[in-house]
Amino acid sequence: MSDEKTLVRLCRADEVPLNEGRRFDVNGTPVALFHLPAGFFAIGDTCSHEEASLSEGFVEDEMVECPRHGAQFDIATGQNRSLPATRPVPAFRVVVDGDDVFVEDPDG
């Protein structure tokens, strides 16, 4: 039996500009997809400090800054890098196949 999770198509690669993020609903889970020079990355879209959309945050040097209180998160890992956030957000595997971007379904 395979341990791989189901992949869900999010968008075309050209729909997310470089150094920006977009929010997607993946079977009820808000996911922030970011396009960085190193590729595409997906993390939970809701800041672990307070309800705010990380996809709307400022992106710089592979970090995203929460638009509400300025907590910073590593886009590749979801790890919190500054207060007021004290917990990471989940990170999800991203697969680019041709022009399409897929993310692992958080629910399997």
Image (cartoon, rainbow, N blue to C red):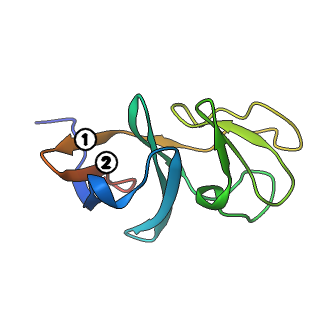
Marks 1 and 2 close (CB-CB < 8 Å): yes
Secondary element type, mark 2: strand
Q: Taking 14 as reference, is 91 above or below it?
A: above
Residue at the spot 45% in from the left edge and 45% down from the top edge: 18
Identity, as a three-letter code, of the amino acid under mark 2:
Glu
Quarter that holds the N terminus: top left
Residue at the spot 83% in from the left edge and 48% down from the top edge: 70
Q: Nearer the viewer, residue 25 or 54?
A: 54
Q: Nearer the viewer, residue 29 or 38?
A: 38
Q: Nearer the viewer, residue 60 or 1?
A: 60
Of badges 1 and 2, the one in the foreground is 1
| Residue 65, x across and y down, in percent | 73, 46
| Residue 52, x across and y down, in percent | 72, 64
In the picture provided, is 82 more to the left or to the right than 90? right
| Residue 73, x across and y down, in percent | 68, 38
Give the mark, 1 or 2, whose residue is nearer the N terminus. 1
| Residue 64, x across and y down, in percent | 66, 43
Q: Which residue is mark 2?
A: 104
Structural crowding at the residue carrying mark 2, measured as other residues with C-alpha within 10 Å and reported as few (<14), some (14–19) or many (≥20): some
Secondary element type, mark 1: strand
Q: CA distance from mark 1 to mark 2?
A: 8 Å
Identity, as a three-letter code, of the amino acid under mark 1:
Val
Residue at the spot 75% in from the left edge and 39% down from the top edge: 72
Q: Which residue is mark 1?
A: 95
Residue at the spot 25% in from the left edge and 45% down from the top edge: 5
How many tags in the picture? 2
Structural crowding at the residue carrying mark 1, measured as other residues with C-alpha within 10 Å and reported as few (<14), some (14–19) or many (≥20): some
